Amino acid sequence: MSLRNYLDKIRPDFEPEGKLHAFRSLYEGFESFLYVPNATTKCGTNIRDAFDSKRMMIMVVIALCPALLFGMYNVGYQHFIAAGLATDFWPVFGFGFLAVLPRLIVSYVVGLAIEFTVAQWKHEEIQEGYLVSGFIIPLIVPATCPLWILAIAVASSVIFAKEIFGGTGMNFPNVALITRALTFFPNPSAISGDGVWVVDHAICGLGASIDGYTQATTLGTASTAIAAPAFDWNMVWGLVPGSVGETSVIAIALGALLLLYTGIASWKTMLSVFVGGGLVAYLFNVAGPDNAMAAMPWYEHFVVGGFCFGAVFMATDPVTSARTETGKFIYGLLIGAMAITIRVMNPGYPEGMMLAILLMNCFAPLIDYCVVQANVNKRAKRVNK
């Protein structure tokens, strides 16, 4: 109650005539983050529920925490293994924590600064969508991604992939994936190749310097190999090189269970991504080109790269994905199929999940339109009989 009373006490300072009116959006955003807004509807019939969009976004962040925490450990683990040091838990986790934390801070500081500025300029409430995007962005890049590159990519994606369309709920591409694309295409060497997956410098006395060390991801190896890499349970546990939050299938599965239990993510989209990917991978196994990626077993595609992370946390984005029930199946099937196709057919870009989701973001409205129109035509024929 003391915090509630304090917020009520300082509220007049943030009103239009108050001395801190320039920060009104910041105050409202912080207040609604802590408490359910007490505003009430004035007319019409409305469904009232304390579980608003901010609470939904916070639940997604909670679902992402296992992937973040394991990713921090894995960053330290990969460094300590490369340096030939003992992998005691706390030193390993501490190293990874200090390596990943700056990228999480940069993502939120840059993105939220733009959100606050736009909200104040438009005299609107701060939109809550970036709570999730800001958390996902550090998880889909290597822990070695330069902070200045990440800051520019975040700023560009928030402005040109979100705010320019009207903000949360109006954007058609996934903001986190646009950030990764703007990081990858102008500076591919910063987040791809063999030299970006192991942090090569000591942090605060933890670890040891391993300048120049390189290590390829499983997908990177498969894209240049003759035979498909053998299945390894470390691919499931996540103790392999890769982007911070994408390596552990177990951690991602824990988040998926929470999203499905709360009804935030669509099981139809999530399941169909795996079905589409598995079917196309199997077809390539049977009659695909003669390369290691085509020969990789269908189930191995799921546990390497960002396939699981993309299927669980980004393909199911309620803003940028298909919204009709039938459309969710079609949307997910096409994402899975396209991701595997890009992996197999383009050895220069073995990770196809980002491009597959972004491309289907563009077609999601068309999928929904076709599904709705088909239903309209079906009903019209029924009436005309």
Image: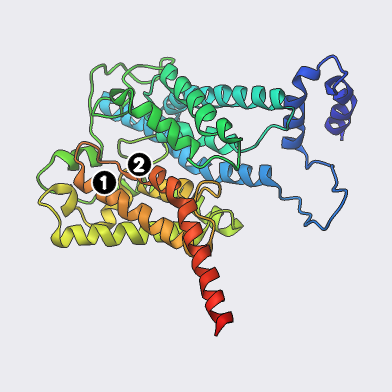
Residue 101 visible? The answer is no
130, above or below 59, in the image: above
Give the quarter of the figure containing the N terminus. top right
Q: Foreground: 385 or 46?
A: 385
Q: Foreground: 259 or 187?
A: 187
Location of residue 198 in the rendering, given as x and y in whole percent from the top left corner? 31, 27
Residue at 77 percent across and 57 percent down: it is 47
- Binning the other alpha carbons within 10 Å of mark 2 as few (below 14), some (14 to 19) or many (20 upward) gives some
Q: Which residue is mark 1?
A: 342
Give the left or right position of residue 162, taking residue 329 as reference: right
Q: Are marks 1 and 2 in contact (CB under 8 Å)?
A: yes
Residue farthest bottom in this picture: 385
Q: Which residue is mark 2?
A: 355
Task: Say what secondary structure mark 2 lies in.
Answer: helix
The amino acid on which the numbered mark 2 sits, given as a three-letter code, is Leu
Give the quarter of the figure containing the C terminus. bottom right
274, above or below 382, in the image: above
The quadrant holding residue 329 is bottom left
Location of residue 301 in the rendering, given as x and y in whole percent from the top left corner? 28, 51
The quadrant holding residue 24 is top right
Task: Say what secondary structure mark 1 lies in.
Answer: helix
The amino acid on which the numbered mark 1 sits, given as a three-letter code, is Ile
Q: Foreground: 102 or 310?
A: 310
Residue at 30 percent across and 39 percent down: it is 240
